[in-house]
Amino acid sequence: MSLFSTTYDVIVVGGGHAGSEAAAASANLGAHTLLITMSLQNIAQMSCNPAMGGIAKGQIVREIDALGGYSGIVTDTTAIQFKMLNKSKGPAMWSPRAQSDRMRFAEEWRNRLEQTENLDFFQDSVSGLLFDGDTIVGVKTALGLEIKSKTVVLTAGTFLNGLIHVGEKTFGGGRAGESASTGITEDLVALGFESGRMKTGTPPRVDGRSLDYSKMTEQPGDEHPEKFSYLSSTQPLQKQRSCYLAHTNKEVHNLLRDGFDRSPMFNGRIKSTGPRYCPSIEDKIDRFATKESHQIFVEPEGWDTVEIYVNGFSTSLPEDVQDKAIRMIPGFENVKFFRYGYAIEYDYFPPTQLTHSLETKQIKNLFFAGQINGTTGYEEAASQGLMAGINAALKVQNKDPFILKRDEAYIGVLIDDLITKGTEEPYRMFTSRAEYRTLLRQDNADLRLTPRSFEIGLASQERMDRVLEKRDSTAKLIHFLTNLSVQKERINPILEAKNLALVSQSMKLIKIAARPQLSFSDLVHLEELKGFLSEHAIDQEIIEQVEIHLKYSGYIAKERNNADKLNRLENVPIPSNFDYNKVKSLSYEAREKLHKIKPISISQASRISGVSPSDVSVLLVYMGR
């Protein structure tokens, strides 16, 4: 079938993490999808660090997997190290993170996409968009092709009018070795879209054979690694590669400071905003001037390659400054560079111009996902791509949009933050951004989201069956613990070994298991429990679920109650054409912000910066509440 004669259901522009998830989701929902990318060899490229997950980001990857996306599976298949971060804290803070083999990650993504039905590919640059009034109808490419589509998902990453900076040198590019994309921003601005500029940076890559690891601290993976995907088709790592920890010092900082006047981020050449939570080494030295040392994480790029990612040394300083300064870090004295660090500027569109489905308010059937919305990070991009792909397919099928609320997923928090609050610097997710993080744990993403995804036809029957089995096994174990009484003579030796208060009579095992100082590993030697776990094939995942339920049930119930109260305001809709100017008792700032954002409910309105509780009360009166 010719590109000239085909009208696709969905065209996805860009083959990064957002574009890959968007294409997979829409195709798996039955939409005839075309993925257009400037380089088929660089699909799902890890442009920056070779890792997935981390604080809050790991929860997002598990949510993507629970919904039927590919990021978790690809990460498990290509991982070289796994760590569960924050394990010493409560389960709401546990965050999985994996180092990946960078080349295999991209290869695995391409292989999976090529095996996805309903998905076509085309290598070209999109140079413009086709409109019919206020509706998008296709794209124009650099080759001069016009390809028609019912919906379009833009996932342009850092490519829109991208500019790369290394010291005094500046050249166009979306990332090192790849051209920038032009034309899309101009088309959208001509239609009245607001655009802005953001920046990000990347550190040098070096030859691992030139490093002296004896001067660094080894950072191995977990002794008992877990995985991201809930499916049994992926397995935890049997062997892992270590990372290493190094530190900068005064000499490094002094050398870097000497080059600040040649740094485009300090001499005024780059005026756009960079990521606060992933600063360059120049930013760290400037902002934390009294700190004499910063951590440098030495991360291998794969199983077999010698290439090393120097995490923590992101910079746009001139090559000679980078070269001199990095050699002052212990272990880097004889370093050989593969490539120098650089900064990149690119266009983005303030995400307040979107609805919760990630469709633009101004143009129908046009969706934005990823860094075009002002976010940073593979995980944030992938989750937006997944949601945009889902909603583009559902739009074509005349179905209601798929929206996740703040108490349902970190993805819901991310999207609501973006469209309600906007962002003036690259947005990244943290557990602190989620007011219901006890509900949104990494261990229960499948229980939260797979049934929702199964309803729309994305999550497979296999995924749903595993969720039902997990629910059933968890309930069985809780029922067993609730009904089993254990004599004090058998409990007290366990409590005594942990220096805990003894019991004076027989007690239900559930009360003992709920003690925060005890874990299941302290109780598994009890014959009844040991026999039950064996007979019902209860694995560690189920034990973890039950432990969290027992020890945190009060916190979970309180948070659920708070979420339910706020969700009542979600059910108070605001008409899309509501005229806030007629509500004279609203503050001027509130009227201005409400007109711009156009919230769909009282709850969303209450989260807009500049809308006070008294403004919310006024709106409730106008909505008949």
Image (cartoon, rainbow, N blue to C red):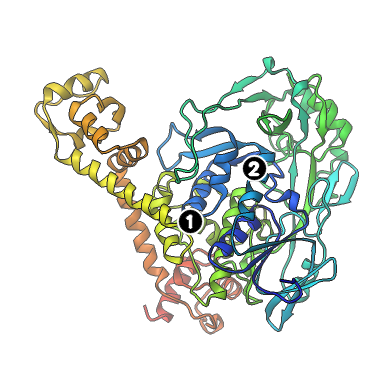
Closest to the observer, 347 or 613: 347
Horizontal side of residue 558 vs 15, given as left or right: left
The picture places residue 607, in percent across and down from the top left corner, at: 50, 63
The x and y percentages for residue 383 are 56, 55
Q: Nearer the viewer, mark 2 or mark 1?
A: 2
* Nearer the observer, 476 or 367: 476
Q: Which quarter of the figure is the N terminus placed in?
A: bottom right
Quarter of the rendering containing residue 98:
top right
- Where residue 188 appears, as percent x and y from the top left, is 75, 71
User: Spatial distance from mark 2 to mark 1, Cα to Cα?
Assistant: 20 Å
Find residue 67 and name its label: 1
Give the mark nearest the N terminus, 2 or 1: 1
| Residue that mark 2 sits on | 105
Query: Looking at this rendering, what residue extends furthest in the top direction?
Result: 214
The residue positioned 25% from the left and 36% from the top of the image is: 514
SS under mark 2: helix
Relative placement, left or right, of 194 versus 26 is right
Give the answer, above or below, for where 561 lies relative to 240: below
The type of residue carrying mark 2 is Phe
Crowd band around label 1 with a 10 angstrom C-alpha radius: few (<14), some (14–19), many (20+):
many
Q: Residue at x 63, y 61 (%)?
A: 369
In the drawing, does residue 324 fall left or right of residue 471? right
Residue type marked 1: Leu
